[in-house]
Image: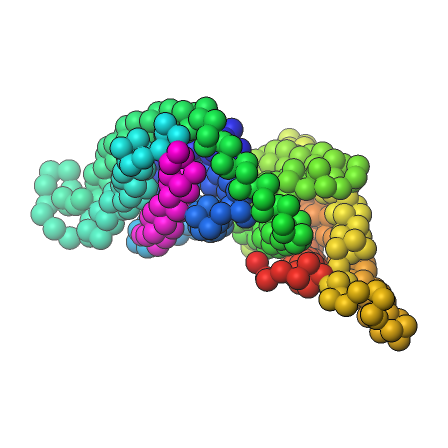
């Protein structure tokens, strides 16, 4: 168990959400906690359940990010969608959170029962406070939005207008956030203290290590399970590569898939050669430059896009470039950082291709035969070898179009900031290329994962 990752994850969770806005992304927190218990979760059923729920919470929080654009896309008369989304995410967060922490503390109590930290009287307070915080945080995110059910067009008329609870929504949001922050700070402090005390218990740590060593010694398919999980992470990253744009705004910010790619390379870097480290550096560059490019593009659109000018975003900005000094220079700065981001993306694709080739050669093919080599006939061996080569050859063939379209997508993305203005139809071309890349990436990651699970003789994850 990696206590440093656990404590870092808790830090990202203690803060309140302001409606759908999460100041310190909970996705990072749940991802850190999941990674912190990943090793022991494979060896113990209690932590296995906790890890599964934390992984679902991580995915749920990633899915929440695109919903933030509801603020930019809906009108004042449609704000009821904010309540619907808050309610949906709040219920799921509370349910998965309660099950995750319940399993987590059951695991802690089981391994700590022979140490000074064990026993219900030692961990009961922290557990109860954790359950309270897990319920309070989403609940107080939802409550202020209930004012949206009140109609601000009808009701008691006062000097300042129609009396409506919607008028006090901002105040309710601030009060709810302060209450959650107070509970969160108490929870964070007590849980930090408890986990650090648990970490110092030699009997607890010894039992954890003994359980892990026994499991990893007896289970040959552990690394195959790890690879399958990492390929699932890549499949999620592939979906977030579908960067949807509307009026100059990106609805799926590229830093989301950048963070997922970086996490993938961070987790696999020790198991592969230099390409794992090159991929880590490249994905870090993609994450940084794409984030800066996205921020600059957002700022550019917010500054220069004027409603009612032209038939769309392209015509609007083209008009601004022709009639205002400095617009083109600002757009070129955006294009520069987008270009740097896509150079890093191409290098990351090369690293991915190399890693995929290694996985295909070493971890795919037919599972080991239950018969010893002596009991196999020459015909059986030749048949198995041919079948094994066929599986690997098929994966190598699938890798080529994925890589080629990935390079094409990077080139299209690098040219997009300028070409979308001067060649409006390029918006559709870029979208089609991106969709094709995402489909090929997702299908290849799924196909490779299936081959890994077959080779390792494990159930699909």
Q: In this view of the protein, can residue 187 be seen by the observer?
A: yes
Query: What residue is shown at x 55% (from left), y 36% (from top)?
Result: 209
Q: Is residue 123 magenta?
A: no
Query: What residue is shown at x 24% (from left), y 45% (from top)?
Result: 143
Query: What residue is shown at x 79% (from left), y 53% (from top)?
Result: 362
Vertical arrangement, residue 87 with respect to residue 5, above or below: below
Query: What residue is shown at x 36% (from left), y 27% (from top)?
Result: 116
Tell which of 335 and 44 is nearer to you: 44
Tell which of 159 and 352 is nearer to you: 352
Tell which of 228 and 26 is nearer to you: 228
Percent position of residue 149, x then y: 22, 53
Q: Is residue 379 left or right of residue 414?
A: right
Q: Is residue 146 left or right of residue 217?
A: left
The residue sitting at the bottom extreme is 379
Vertical arrangement, residue 176 with respect to residue 257, above or below: above
Percent position of residue 219, x then y: 63, 51
Count of labels in the image: 0
Q: In this view of the protein, can residue 309 be seen by the observer?
A: no
Percent position of residue 299, x then y: 54, 35
Magenta segment, principal secondary structure?
helix
Tell which of 174 and 442 is nearer to you: 442
Q: Which residues are magenta?
A: 85-114
By what rule are the colours in the image chosen? rainbow
Percent position of residue 185, x then y: 33, 27
Q: Is residue 104 magenta?
A: yes
Q: Is residue 328 left or right of residue 187?
A: right
Q: Quadrant of the C terminus?
A: bottom right
Residue 442 position by quadrant: bottom right
Q: Is residue 408 left or right of residue 301?
A: right
């Amino acid at each position: 168990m990696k206590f440093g990752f656990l404590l870092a994850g808790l830090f990202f969770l203690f803060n309140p959400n302001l409606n759908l806005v999460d100041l310190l992304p909970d996705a990072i927190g749940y991802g850190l906690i999941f990674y912190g218990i990943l090793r022991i979760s494979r060896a113990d059923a209690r932590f296995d359940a906790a890890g599964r729920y934390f992984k679902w919470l991580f995915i749920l929080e990633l899915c929440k990010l695109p919903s933030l654009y509801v603020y930019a896309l809906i009108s004042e008369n449609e704000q009821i969608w904010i309540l619907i989304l808050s309610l949906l995410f709040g219920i799921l967060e509370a349910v998965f959170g309660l099950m995750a922490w319940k399993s987590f503390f059951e695991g802690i109590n089981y391994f700590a029962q022979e140490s000074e930290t064990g026993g219900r009287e030692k961990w009961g307070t922290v557990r109860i406070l954790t359950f309270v915080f897990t319920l309070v945080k989403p609940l107080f995110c939802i409550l202020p939005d209930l004012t949206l059910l009140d109609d601000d067009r009808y009701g008691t008329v006062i000097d300042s207008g129609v009396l409506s609870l919607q008028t006090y929504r901002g105040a309710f949001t601030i009060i709810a956030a302060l209450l959650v922050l107070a509970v969160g700070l108490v929870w964070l402090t007590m849980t930090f203290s408890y986990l650090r005390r648990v970490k110092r218990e030699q009997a607890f740590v010894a039992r954890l290590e003994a359980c892990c060593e026994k499991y990893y010694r007896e289970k040959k398919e552990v690394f195959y399970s790890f690879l399958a999980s990492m390929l699932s992470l890549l499949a999620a990253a592939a979906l977030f590569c579908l960067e949807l744009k509307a009026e100059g705004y990106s609805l799926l910010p590229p830093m989301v898939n950048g963070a997922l790619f970086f996490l993938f390379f961070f987790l696999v870097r020790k198991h592969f050669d230099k390409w794992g480290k090159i991929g880590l550096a490249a994905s870090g560059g993609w994450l940084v430059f794409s984030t800066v490019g996205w921020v600059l593009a957002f700022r550019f659109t917010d500054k220069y896009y004027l409603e009612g000018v032209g038939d769309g975003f392209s015509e609007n900005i083209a008009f601004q470039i022709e009639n205002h000094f400095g617009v083109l220079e600002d757009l070129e700065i955006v294009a520069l950082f987008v270009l740097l981001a896509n150079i890093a993306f191409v290098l990351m694709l090369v690293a991915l291709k190399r890693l995929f080739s290694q996985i295909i050669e070493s971890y795919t093919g037919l599972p080991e035969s239950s018969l010893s080599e002596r009991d196999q006939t020459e015909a059986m061996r030749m048949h198995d070898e041919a079948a094994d080569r066929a599986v690997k050859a098929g994966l190598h063939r699938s890798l080529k179009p994925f890589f080629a379209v990935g390079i094409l997508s990077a080139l299209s993305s690098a040219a997009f900031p300028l070409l979308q203005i001067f060649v409006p139809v390029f918006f559709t071309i870029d979208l089609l290329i991106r969709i094709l890349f995402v489909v090929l990436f997702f299908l290849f990651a799924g196909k490779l994962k299936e081959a890994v699970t077959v080779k390792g003789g494990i159930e699909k994850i």
